[in-house]
Image: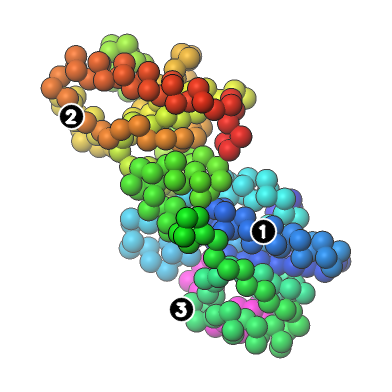
């Protein structure tokens, strides 16, 4: 997959079939669009092109909405789209000036004078242009003007639920990582850098790597204890691990700030300032305030047993990592 950093940079000598959107999460609905895109490109002996935007439009249009969290960093999104088998990825800059383009200006500048598709494929809820004024019908009409056809793919459903990036975010914010894994068709990823902690886990017999998430827009699942697979920087092996996300209410003098603590079940080396890649498989329980450290340690022992038992049901590495 070739990556282009502006629609004007893209050139092709063969017919182009295009899709466009933010594709946050690259969930099963997105994958259905991409599969159809690739199929239509093969039909015309052409190339598949996905046009997306960076930064995410909502961070530009509504910077005051600090609660906005994203499923993917731009690097994660690129990797997922590469795995999906695209020929080209165009990452166009999203700015305030760009957001003011009318649907006509949007299609003229990006499509007619940029990527020059013969066909455009969109998802069921696609809107475009200033104030999201552009619709499926208006795109069809603009296609007649600029020489491309349009195909809309219906919503993808799982157990009668329409899958969307918003639905996946809501599931993760409730801790439903197994549900999110179904909709994403992959385990939810989280990348963090190890920082020095208070060494309390080591004293309890459960040494942990304490993570800083480097991208502040990256969504962190709800508080709780999770079964995950973890991979240390520079290594290829995925290791079973349990993760606690929360404020550590049992610990006297705890700051009350969210902590992400990773305990590798097979042990591990010192890895301060290194990256750890996590894949969330299942939420095992809520975060609980215990009567003291003895009760906490007893629960950690039970957590380890439960996490080991659950993760042993998967191939290593799991096929959906």
Magenta segment includes 118: no
Residue 15 position within the rendered picture, expressed as x and y whole percent measured from the top left: 82, 69
- Residue in the image at 48% along x and 77% along y: 132
Residue that numbered label 1 is attached to: 34
Q: Quadrant of residue 260?
A: top left
Residue 292 rendering spot, x and y as whole percentages: 15, 19
Name the N-terminal-most of marks 1 and 3: 1
Q: Residue at x 74, y 79 (%)?
A: 148
Q: For this view, does 180 lie left or right of residue 14?
A: left
Residue under label 3 = 131
Q: Kindly identify the residue that appears in the image at 71 percent across and 87 percent down.
A: 144
- Helix, strand or loop at label 1? It is helix
Foreground residue among 272 and 144: 144
| Residue 177 x %, y % | 42, 42
Q: Which residues are magenta?
A: 94-109
Question: Gap in Å between the C-alphas at discs 1 and 3?
Answer: 26 Å
């Amino acid at each position: 997959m070739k990556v282009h950093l502006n629609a004007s940079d893209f050139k092709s000598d063969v017919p182009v079939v295009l899709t466009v959107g933010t594709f946050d999460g690259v969930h099963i609905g997105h994958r259905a669009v991409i599969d159809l895109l690739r199929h239509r490109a093969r039909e015309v002996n052409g190339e598949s092109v996905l046009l997306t935007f960076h930064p995410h439009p909502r961070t530009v249009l509504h910077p005051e909405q600090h609660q906005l969290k994203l499923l993917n960093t731009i690097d994660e999104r690129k990797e997922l789209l590469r795995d999906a088998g695209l020929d080209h990825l165009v990452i166009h800059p999203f700015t305030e000036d760009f957001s003011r383009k009318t649907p006509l200006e949007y299609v003229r500048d990006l499509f007619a004078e940029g990527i020059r598709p013969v066909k455009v494929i969109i998802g069921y809820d696609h809107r475009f242009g200033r104030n999201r004024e552009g619709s499926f019908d208006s795109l069809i009409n603009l296609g007649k003007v600029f020489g491309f056809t349009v195909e809309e793919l219906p919503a993808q459903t799982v157990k009668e639920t329409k899958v969307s990036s918003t639905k996946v975010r809501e599931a993760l914010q409730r801790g439903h990582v197994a549900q999110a894994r179904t909709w994403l068709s992959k385990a939810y990823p989280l990348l963090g850098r190890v920082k020095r902690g208070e060494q309390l886990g080591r004293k309890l017999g459960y040494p942990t790597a304490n993570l800083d998430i480097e991208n502040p827009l990256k969504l962190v699942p709800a508080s709780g204890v999770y079964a995950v697979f973890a991979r240390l920087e520079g290594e290829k092996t995925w290791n079973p691990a349990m993760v606690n996300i929360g404020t550590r209410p049992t610990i006297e003098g705890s700051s009350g700030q969210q902590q992400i603590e990773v305990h590798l079940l097979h042990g591990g080396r010192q890895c301060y300032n290194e990256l750890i890649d996590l894949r969330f498989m299942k939420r095992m329980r809520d975060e609980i305030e215990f009567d003291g450290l003895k009760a906490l340690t007893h629960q950690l022992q039970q957590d380890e047993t439960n996490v080991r038992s659950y993760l042993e049901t998967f191939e290593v590495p799991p096929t959906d990592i």
